[in-house]
Amino acid sequence: MNADKTVKLADYVFDYIKKLGVKDIFMLSGGGCMHLCDSLGRSGINYICCLHEQGATIAALAYSHYKNDLGVALVTTGPGSTNALTGVAGAWAESAPLMIISGQVKTADISGKSGVRMLGFQEAPTVDIVKPVTKYAVTVSDPRKIKYHLDKAVHIAKSGRPGPVWIDIPLDVQAAKINPAKLKGFKPAKEPARSLKKEALRVLSMIEKSQRPVIMAGYGIRISGAVNDFLKLIKMLGIPVLTTWKGADLLTDENPYFYGRPGTAGQRGANFILQNSDLFISLGARLDFGQIGYEHSSFAREAKKVIVDIDPAELNKFRFKIDMPINDDCGDLIREMLLLKPSPKNCRAWLDYCSQVNEKYPVVLPQYRKKKKYISTYVLAEEISRNMMNGDIFVPGSSGMCSDIPMQVFKFKKDQRSLNSPGIGSMGFGVPSALGACVASGKKRVICTNGDGGFQLNIQELETIRRLNLPVKFFVLNNDGYASIKTTQRNYFGGFYVGSNSTSGVTLPDTIKIAQAYGFKAFYLDKTSAIKKVIKKILNSKGPAICEVMIDPMEAVAPKVSSAVEADGKMFSKPLEDLYPFLPRPEFLKNMIIKPIKEG
């Protein structure tokens, strides 16, 4: 490089990002990022013009999830930056390396510590706003430090527990001339080499001494780049494996050691397996309330617990004893265990129990298939899963029936991916997440189940999907509003609805007319007998498509953890093994290996 050659800082930024291997950036242009927009357009990087900054950042988050690498979004100053916050909060919760580059008013127009609320046009204290949900956030005030900030941001975003970073660049700094040859970078401190051989030996010893071991496989396995090593390890060990929702695509349904996805809205059989274990090994799973229930004391209560997490705060949050906490990369432990070449565990009786309890309690019940007036979401999810092909991508809405039920029902096949954001669980993730996943995959087929309520949030990105002619297939559940809120109001407030359906203030537009307005192929499904034919037709259609599915407005997620009332009137949360609808007590007790919790 010519030692005296100068370039515009904005040009340098996107040349830097291009050299990282980033091929696509999601953006929404604005005056506050005009130099950045111009430079992005000239950089050769493919840019996707979204129609709302929240859509852009959520799409970049899904892109990051699919690639297991940096996702990037460009937004403008002030409202452009505040609009982007939800996607960033999602990346913070879901451990995704996401970089937001934002414009900012000129350095001279930043109010700073002056006491003035706003000095520059569309100014906002962006860094102060985003700091709580980013690993690194900075306003670049000195053009000569741009390489330092980019180096530091990328390193921090991708190291340790990944997460979002934010680079805020004022207009005058965007336009500044810099000499790349004279820029100083950021050099991270070298991490001391650490062997996990001792820990690996101890875990293998605990497995050998146990009678009912189980592994909980989380998304951290994928983040650590250890998916293939993990598959080799469980084949060697020969013990049952459960997955989190984020880790749902780690194992195919045909894997002989896969036994389900437990949780507060989990599979009944998987929950029995988890709770009856005598050794619980968690690899790269956050183990939030949705995964382990609300009463920590009842979780896997007779099991020794090994929990591997790269974030020490996650290990310190539990209100139960961890017999072996390992604050490290789960991938390093997996690889260390592989090197020790463990022998298969002889636990035939335990494996037989796991198979039997899963067979005894299928998620999709016969009565769901007999509905005539409406379609059951369980039957819909089952048929979608059955017709999806190897390599397809599934993107559920991030909360409610459109997410919970497919996660109970789906049977994943080879090379399929599931991309969801259950941590922040926001309505409005479905459409832009499908967009980001499809772009990241090179236009593989994406199937998205979305509620009719959540579908309205970020609906504008349907135009982006149409413009790019992406093969995204939406199944929109028409259940008259917000199903999860309606269920809560029925269960806890005597069916007094407020802001949850058409009788309580929430009305939603005609999905078919929306599909037609956006230029999508439109389908309508209201009969169980037509499910197979219509789903095949939709999945085999070219380009984007929307199918409105008429769902029973009273359908709820089941089985699910519920509360019960004690003799003195106090409410308490049932343990994970005791899901609603409650089994008859003799049948429930027959499934229990450990001592049941005494109630009342």
Image (cartoon, helix red, strand yellow):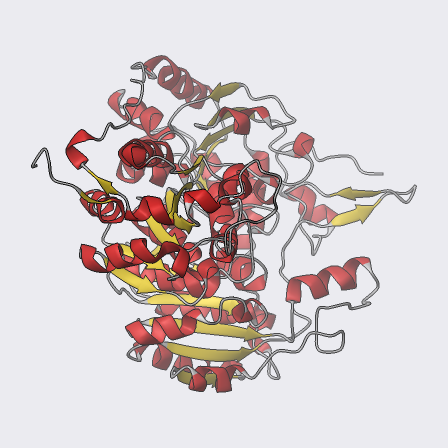
Left or right: residue 43 versus residue 374 is left
Percent position (x, y) of residue 435?
37, 64
The residue sitting at the left extreme is 2
- The residue depicted at 29 percent of the width and 72 percent of the height is 468
- Residue positioned most to the front: 108
In the image, 480 versus 572, the foreground residue is 480
Q: Nearer the viewer, residue 99 or 443?
A: 99
Q: Position of residue 550 (x, y in %)?
A: 57, 79
Q: Does residue 354 appear in this view?
A: no
One can see residue 113 in this view: yes
Q: Residue visible at 63% across and 59% down?
A: 558
Which of these two is toward me, 458 or 255?
A: 458
Residue at horizontal 77 percent and vertical 62 percent from the top? 489
Where residue 9 sits in the image (x, y, percent)? 26, 44
> On the picture, is 36 further left or further right than 325?
left
Q: Give how far across and how far down residue 118 sits, in percent.
A: 57, 49
Q: Quadrant of the N terminus?
A: top left
* Quarter of the rendering occupied by the C terminus: top right
